[in-house]
Image (tube, helix red, strand yellow):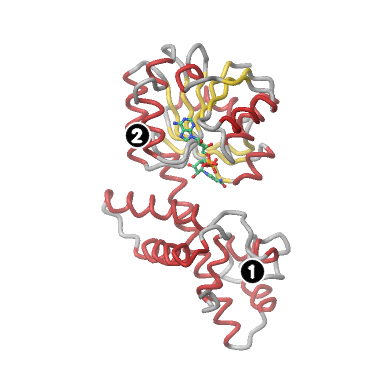
Amino acid sequence: MATIGFIGLGNMGGPMAANLAKAGHAVKAFDLSDAARASAVEAGCTAAASVAEAASGVEVVVTMLPAGPHVRSVYTGPDGVLGAAVKGTLMIDCSTIDVDSARAVSKSCDEAGMMMVDAPVSGGVAGAAGGTLTFMVGGSEAAFEKAKPILEAMGKTIVHAGGPGNGQAAKICNNMLLGITMIGTCEAFMLANKLGLDAQKLFDISSKASGQNWSMTSYCPVPGPVPTSPANRDYQPGFAADMMLKDLKLAQEAAARAGASTPLGANAEALYQLFSNNGHGGLDFSGIIKMIGGLDT
Ligand code: NAD
């Protein structure tokens, strides 16, 4: 069992830290929020008073923070992780952030004599609570092998995606594709409706034909065909549209810097931005069908 400093105890980090404690690890937990720290203590962690305290004298540091600037400052800022941790500490950043920040922080860790992996997740809050997350991991083979047993206490599927930043690259490529297929699926169901084709009939046919995709068969955006999909509970998330928008923006920024042509990704970003601007960013991302169908005002 390892000694772990856990920084960022929000919707995802809170239950992830709890699962590490449940697995028998000694977890020192820090968040800017007193309430989040108190919940972590109730879940079996001990509270740290600062980032530096969480990172000092531990074998592993895990971070679960909102975005790239938070990760850069928590690791490399004054009183940050790198100034406090002992050489050889393994760093695991599970936040979803831009590829450049992930690679820059990994390089700083390397220079400070620490190992680092970027390990963004899919599976959402339910996956974090149930310990069933999927981790997409970027970093050296040695860092991946060291991180794996720690990640296994929080997730079910752990995939090594390549060198530093490749976990983030995998995450944004996957979620760009998800955003695009969701919008395409919404368009198909709305067209079917206008043509007098029953939604269940389209589902029965398309889920066995070449239009088959996850957004349809596991997360259908119309009520009925997939009973567990958010469409059956008035589009309560699930995976909020604003979270999808964040990932689509990361994908577009990465595409612009890499010179990749992603016109459908750009359109998906514009449509989710419009949906969010209309006040629906808190709805599940499949709720965009309301806007596609002209039902959103
Ligand atoms: P959240 O906003 O609930 O939690 C972030 C936490 O970080 C907050 O509690 C905040 O107080 C804390 N924090 C911010 N700056 C800090 C600092 N300097 N020191 C210590 N704590 C600090 O967000 P979340 O939903 O837990 O998401 C975390 C990350 O996981 C994000 O990058 C998000 O994109 C990603 N993610 C979220 C989901 C989801 O369904 N919520 C799914 C997959 C990935």
Q: Kindly identify the residue that appears in the image at 45 percent across and 56 percent down.
A: 245
Q: CA distance from mark 2 to mark 1?
A: 39 Å
Q: Kindly identify the residue that appears in the image at 50 percent across and 52 percent down.
A: 243
Q: Kindly identify the residue that appears in the image at 26 percent across and 53 percent down.
A: 259
Left or right for 172, reference 21: left
Left or right for 114, reference 231: left
Location of mark 2 (residue):
103
Q: Amino acid at mark 1?
A: Ser
In the rendering, which numbered label is found on residue 156?
none
In the rendered view, would you say 75 is above or below 89?
A: below
In the rendered view, would you say 87 is above or below 74?
A: above
Query: Which residue occupies the foreground of this view, 97 or 8?
Result: 8
Residue 109 visible to an observer of this rendering: yes
Location of mark 1 (residue):
207
* Ligand 1 contact, mark 2 (Cβ < 8 Å): no
Indicate which disc, 2 or 1, sits on the residue closer to the N terminus.
Answer: 2
Q: Kindly identify the residue that appears in the image at 65 percent across and 60 percent down.
A: 218
At label 2, counting other C-alpha atoms closer than 10 Å, the crowd grade (few under 14, some 14-19, many 20 or more) is many
At label 1, counting other C-alpha atoms closer than 10 Å, the crowd grade (few under 14, some 14-19, many 20 or more) is some
Q: Position of residue 202 (x, y in %)?
A: 64, 77
Q: Secondary structure at mark 1?
A: loop
Q: In the current view of this chain or complex, which residue is farthest to the front?
A: 34
Q: Position of residue 119 (x, y in %)?
A: 49, 35
Left or right for 204, reference 82: right
Q: Amino acid at mark 2?
A: Arg
Q: Are marks 2 and 1 in contact (CB under 8 Å)?
A: no
In terms of image quadrants, where is residue 78? top left
